[in-house]
Image (spheres, rainbow, N blue to C red):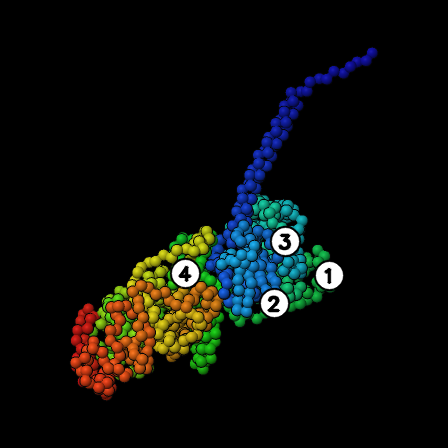
Amino acid sequence: MVIEATSLPDPPRIVFKRRIVRLGLVFLLMAAAIAADAVASSYRYYSQIIDARLATGYLTSRPGLYAAPRVLEAGQKLTPAKLIAVLQRAGYVESKASDVWSGSFSVSDSAIEIRPGRSKQPQLVRVAFNGDGIAELRDDVGGLVESFTLEPEVLSTDLSAKAGKREILSYGEIPDVMVHAILAIEDRRFFEHSGVDLRGLGRAFLRNVGDEEMGQGGSTITQQLVKNTYLSPEKTLQRKYSEAMLAVALERRLSKSDILALYSNEIYLGQRGAVAVRGIREAAEVFYGKELRDLSLSEAATLAGMIQSPARYSPLRHPDEARARRNVVLAAMQQNGWITLEQNAKASAEPVTVASAPAVDNSLAPYFVDYVNRLAESQFETSGNNQRIYTTIDLELQQAAEQALKQQLDHLDAVYSKRDLKPQASLVALDPHTGNILAMVGGRNYAESQLNRATDALRQPGSTFKPFVYAAALEDGMSQVQMFMDAPREFVYDRNKIYQPANYGGGYSMREVTMRTGLVRSLNVVTVDVALQTGLARIANLANRFGLPKPERYPALALGTEEVTPLQLASAYAAFVNDGRRVEAKAIRSVGEPPATHAAPVNVDQVVSPTTAYMITNMLAGVIDRGTARKARGAVRGTAIAGKTGTSRDGWFVGYSPNLVCVVWIGFDNNKQLGLTGAEAALPAWVDFMNDAIALRPDLGGENFECPEGIKFVEIDSATGLISTVTCPVRELIAVTDRTAPSMECYLHGNLPPQSSPFAEESETTREEIAVKRAPPEPLKDYRATRVEVDSKGRRALVNDMR
């Protein structure tokens, strides 16, 4: 008989356990699903961050300072080699490029083709060259392109240190030895993982579990890249998670070669002098004075070893630590099969050496960067470390400014070598219609002195102040052909005080000259006379409206005794080009978003009439044509220029074209007497800069200054200020208004006086007798007794008899 076994029900305890297990599995699945959904949502969030950066430009959408974008136009004196350097600095690579780069370019015998990295019209620009520079620009269908704007160049991403001049490096330009050195020590599985190395991350997590402050280790090259370009520097679990998610998202959008190239351009490799070294190309130049492709195995391993801690492993400061770290890199390269045992042994035995410090400061507009950072902190409650700040600086003009000052300072160093002195210098150039600062040099060497003399050094401007005196006189109704005595004089002011100015060098013509000649020849006595007749209060108030410090009301103010900065002076002179309207000097164009291509200028104040501004410009053009700056006559070809020399303890020159104002100052920080005129000290640097600037950007020049309504041109005899005749020996064409124009013809050079002459009643007097009557009496001592009294308001009250 077969007995069938019957299944007995499970005990209640077992049933309960099974239910618990099932319920746990359900909860685990739910938790896994929730976690997966959270991770997916998180990944979408971080992917959007990556996509936004790629859409707006990976290189130009990170926090930091940016220069004004370069605009290419036909006629610019730009060689192919120079354009290639500009493109590389702006993030263009010489090959087919992904969207991570600003674009790509290719070079042929006669042209350079530029392909923007993102959707931008035109899709291609072909830049053709001739012997002088850019001949024309054409688009992808052959049509002429008037201009093309490149992406802006990064000035600095870390304002605690100054960036150097560097060019973007593509993957194909990185030599194998450098690639292998970096991968061996930083991320040997770089080409295998998907942005996060789980094994490395696991090791780092185990070392730091339970500790909110994360330690070093576990980051891939991709993670390091996103940490440096997206995240703040704190080491927390949240930042580590963000770093990993961003790395995975970035790897799904960029190729490995692009990621490694970006990393190689971004890594910080210490500092030398005033320059923070970023990227392996710049490091090769700064530490070894070599092109990247020329690095030896030992040098490449040394640079790769610095990545972890640039200060600790600096070959400059810690050669022993640098050597030990280099040998670790070499051992890792051998372990991965990238070098042989013999190569390792030979390179490990080499001493750690560096090239001598570069003779030329490689920092990128360091004085300007400091100035912008100061403005950003005061105006926007932020700095370049957490905002995108688009500035006005034109780096090509900046380079031209630095070179012009260096050349002049080298010349002056030879002059002052026997006295063991080295003068300082500064230069400011700005657009007079917008106020945009296009170039700024604050001293001869930023590493030696961080004082920005362009913005912070107050010095007496000397005769560069005189145009504001004459502008006040013209506004007051005086005519530039009004006559003033050029001879030693005593001026009485405030009833009992005497001021006795002297012309520079002690020379006098000892005759009456026109007010125009007083400015053109920079005659101190005439200028003081003009100032007293105009009114010292009127001049002081007008100078203040021009943006200059308001001077004390003493006669000496006319000769530029009130201290100013070069930037203030440049901004004030801009009004003479800008129809009498003053614009504020501007260093920041926009914050957060790129500026509009053609932003409307903001005019602050109409300080003088357009006709007065133009007459001053016409007079300052005479300074260059036949006055104290005649060394510059014809020096800037094809361009109308005007300007004024200044000599105090220092040497000044302020000059401008129709679209560019530039101030050059040369002097000593300790306020010692320079002993040179502005024409000798500052003018040569100004000429060099203006020539280079207008060659680079012809739009900054102009054949003529724009003439406003109400101006007419009259040819005068220079000696008398009267309307010239064919027999006048020295004639000049001047700009006047109907009210200030001369009404008589010259009668001193072979012509009888016209009926409107004040000498009409002496019509029978011979020309020679008239000439004698108009000549200044002799001897010189007669004029030393001249006294001109003015009332308390600064206006002329009485002229004593001249003995």
Viewer-nearest of discs 1 and 3 = 3
Q: Which mark is residue 340?
A: 1
Q: Is residue 367 visible?
A: no
In front of the other: 515 or 215: 515
Residue type of the residue flagged with mark 4: Asn
Q: Which residue is mark 3?
A: 257
Q: Between disc 2 and disc 1, whose residue precedes?
A: 2
Task: Categorize mark 2 by other alpha carbons within 10 Å: few (<14), some (14-19), many (20+).
Answer: some
Helix, strand or loop at disc 2? loop
Distance in Å between CA atoms under marks 2 and 1: 25 Å
Q: Which of pointers 2 and 4 indicates the residue nearer the eye?
A: 4
Residue at (26%, 79%) from the top-left corner? 746
Query: Residue 436: which disc?
Result: 4
Q: Nearer the viewer, residue 538 or 360?
A: 538
Image location of residue 119, percent across then percent down:
54, 50
Pointer 4: residues within 10 angstroms few (<14), some, or many (20+)?
many
Q: Secondary structure at mark 3?
A: helix
The residue sitting at 26% across, 77% down in the picture is 745
N-term mark: 2 or 4: 2
Secondary structure at badge 4 equals: loop
Please name the amino acid that badge 1 sits on: Thr
Sequence-wise, which precedes: disc 1 or disc 4? 1
